[in-house]
């Protein structure tokens, strides 16, 4: 039986596995984690709207009924491309076809010391750490009598105004102005300041400019202070130092969140060293039009790790690209098994969506562009439909419904080891 | 304004705070955590049925509309009983009435080295750590080719057969036999062995013997191996050593859970040292019939920390006792403010309930005793009614409904720092 190993259970890997369900292959999906994470909703966990369990699904549950598939919890550390063996931290896995879908990780532009101060948003642990920081900041402000220090606790800086930064800023503005309005006695949460920083001249710089400007208007309505064309030169425990067109500046803030950049996962380097793959300047693996690497037609690279160009531009690192690539490599594998020819991969862009707070968003479908409540509703619909399993879908829908009516956020728990457990 | 400080936001503290909502007092609720935890359902988080957010409610949200109350995130480290000041790690809090409701913590009978190997079940972090251990054990077994080592990964030991131990054992048996049945390829989860150990001659030893025996029958039906009259003499990373009536014994097991005992919180010692309170041999604070300590009628002690006898026996450390005591001290405080006499506290026992797996349970209402499906339904009803807020109640109800029909558990995520984040 033809052995297919898929490395990574994100959108790319999972959709590849599912599209192979009727194929005559022996399939192994390897991941470090036991669950698929619906990353586009991670910011809702970070801001207390959803619980981790609601945007994650155990990989074993998703593939339970797929008899040709097994799931292995494992950490891929190396590759023996010659003998077609994936090297795990505690074993080896032979393959005939390898599909690498290890995605991306937070990237701090070489300033790894910022990682601890300004958490990014790629994992469940990132999201609960951010939730912890956000909620604790309000608690600290409530107890802080000194006005300047209180102000620093109530100042939130988000670095990066792409979709993640914009969605975080919108949700945070709602928390500050609506959800927590009546929760505190000494401070007024609506005093809090939310800065959204970006080096580009507009928020959502990959969107058409008309939508960027609409998004900025929605953010301003929510009280978010968007500052564009600025560069962060340093981050410390008490704030952020900037380079602006008019000189250096400083924002005193106790909470800084990182939404500025991701880098491809480190497995790209393994592919370069062990299989002769070529990397682009950011570390993405450059693949041919069939999404395989040179001289190794049995190794596919899909999703955020891959670099493939279409119409002269690299495809963006978003879920729809990974999903379509996952399905494509599954079909390609099946066709090859019966020696049928395989067409090059083409990405069909169904559009981009970003949401800003409770009732605004932007949607770009090429010629069709929406903003405001219509874009928000579209976002809601698309994300509910994509949530992998029915149970999650219903529960998330009910939770959102409640929240929409009550302005309440159920998952506002400060947990984790940073806070001592109650033993007094 | 009369200043009431409540230390602890568990059942006792929260019900005291709520019962003071119309009282002419200035109320401060202090807790180390920002949420009230519905501890009776903690085992459902540990076994992946519910998410942490579904059994916890932010204290600020619960007391949002109570204008005389404020919530303070704080760590009480000392007491100045003379000047009526509670000493926090970072400040002081003056009071006229102090209500101490700091509860209990895991207790390992002096073997603190067992804590790391055999996690107890008192906090959200405990529950997610247990979930992590349980799910990882199946993953390890799936990869382990050596039969004896695999068997140790599939052996689960629960120390303590009180309600928590019995509920954990029942849920774990279901996971092994139903939920994960089709999830694995190399192992058959129904091969797993679940041991429930207790020094008493029966499980649920505080219940009438007829119900204990029914509970044992239900456990056996679920495949749980109940071993009574045994004492754990040591716990290490590879198993448990026992003293049994017929000599020493050993169970090789990679997962051991602690449900054998709790001890009153350490604040009891502060009350002993600073306010002359008397402690019983386990460290509970002995209180008079009005739940105050000798010579300090302004200091109440309620819930699991207190020792109060009724009909010659100390009241058990269960939620209904804490709830009734919380309401009692609120009424007592109000009556004192208008110089009205205060009757001694009387606990009204509404009954005890424990659930065993999906459709069995035991219920003890004095003369009325139930077991089987009726007890299980009663348990379901009572617990849903007590969940503090409507939103949680509905979501938990829907989740349970799904689970009942599908045998599925949504929150089967292995998270936390013990598992490295995905960066390969």
Image (cartoon, coloured by chain):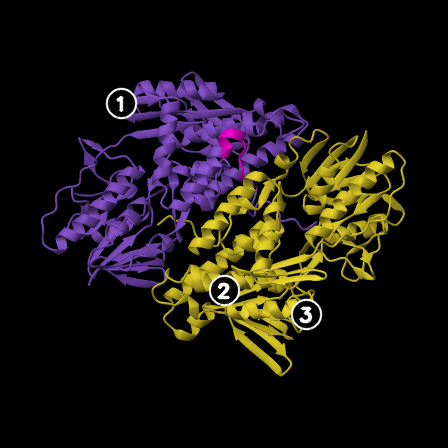
Chain colours: A purple, B yellow
Structural distance between the alpha carbons of marks 3 and 1? 72 Å
Q: Is residue A19 left or right of residue A195?
A: left
Q: Which one is in front, B274 or B280? A: B280
- The chain containing the residue under callout 1 comes to A
Q: Position of residue A38 (x, y in %)?
A: 38, 42
**Mark 3 surroundings: few (<14), some (14-19) or many (≥20) residues within 10 A:** few
- Residue, disc 2: B173
Structural distance between the alpha carbons of marks 1 and 2? 54 Å
Q: Is residue B235 visible?
A: yes
Range shown magenta:
A402-411
Q: Position of residue A333 (x, y in %)?
A: 18, 52
Residue sitting at 66 percent across and 35 percent down?
B63
Q: Is residue A404 magenta?
A: yes
- The chain containing the residue under callout 2 comes to B
Mark 3 vs mark 1: same chain? no
- Residue, disc 1: A368
Q: Position of residue B83 (x, y in %)?
A: 85, 38
Q: Is residue B135 magenta?
A: no
Q: Is residue B414 visible?
A: no
**Mark 2 surroundings: few (<14), some (14-19) or many (≥20) residues within 10 A:** many
Disc 1 element? strand
């Amino acid at each position: 039986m033809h052995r297919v190993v898929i490395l990574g259970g994100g959108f790319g890997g999972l959709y590849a596995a599912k599209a192979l369900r009727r194929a005559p292959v022996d399939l192994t999906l390897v991941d470090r984690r036991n669950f698929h994470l619906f990353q586009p909703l991670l910011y809702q966990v970070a801001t207390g709207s959803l619980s981790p369990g609601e945007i994650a699904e155990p990989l074993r549950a998703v593939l339970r009924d797929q008899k040709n598939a097994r799931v292995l919890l494992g950490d891929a550390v190396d590759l023996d491309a010659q003998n077609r063996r994936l090297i795990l931290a505690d074993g080896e896995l032979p393959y005939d076809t390898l599909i690498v879908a290890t995605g991306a990780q937070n990237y701090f532009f070489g300033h790894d010391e910022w990682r601890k101060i300004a958490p990014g948003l790629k994992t469940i642990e990132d999201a609960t750490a951010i939730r912890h920081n956000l909620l604790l900041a309000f608690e600290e402000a409530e107890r802080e009598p000194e006005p300047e220090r209180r102000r620093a606790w109530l100042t939130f800086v988000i670095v990066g105004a792409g979709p993640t930064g914009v969605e975080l800023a919108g949700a945070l503005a709602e928390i500050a102005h609506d959800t927590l309005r009546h929760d505190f006695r000494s401070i007024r949460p609506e005093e809090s300041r939310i800065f959204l920083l970006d080096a580009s001249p507009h928020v959502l710089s990959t969107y058409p400019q008309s939508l960027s400007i609409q998004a900025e208007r929605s953010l301003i309505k929510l009280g978010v202070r968007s500052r564009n064309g600025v560069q962060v030169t340093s981050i410390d425990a008490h704030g952020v130092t900037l380079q602006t067109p008019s000189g250096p500046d400083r924002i005193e803030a106790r909470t800084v969140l990182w939404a500025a950049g991701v880098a491809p996962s480190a497995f790209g380097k393994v592919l370069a060293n062990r299989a002769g793959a070529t990397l682009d300047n950011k570390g993405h693996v450059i693949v041919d039009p069939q999404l395989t690497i040179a001289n190794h037609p049995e190794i596919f690279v899909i999703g955020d790790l891959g670099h493939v160009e279409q119409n002269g531009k690299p495809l963006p690192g978003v879920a729809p690209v990974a999903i379509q690539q996952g399905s494509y490599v599954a079909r390609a594998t099946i066709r090859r098994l019966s020696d049928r020819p395989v067409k090059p991969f083409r990405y069909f862009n169904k559009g981009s969506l970003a949401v800003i707070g409770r009732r605004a968003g932007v949607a770009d479908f090429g010629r069709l562009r929406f903003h405001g409540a219509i874009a928000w509703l579209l976002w809601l619909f698309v994300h509910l439909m994509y949530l992998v399993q029915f149970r999650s879908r219903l529960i998330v829908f009910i939770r959102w419904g409640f929240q929409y009516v009550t302005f309440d956020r159920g998952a506002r728990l400060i947990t984790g080891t940073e806070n001592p457990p109650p033993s007094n």
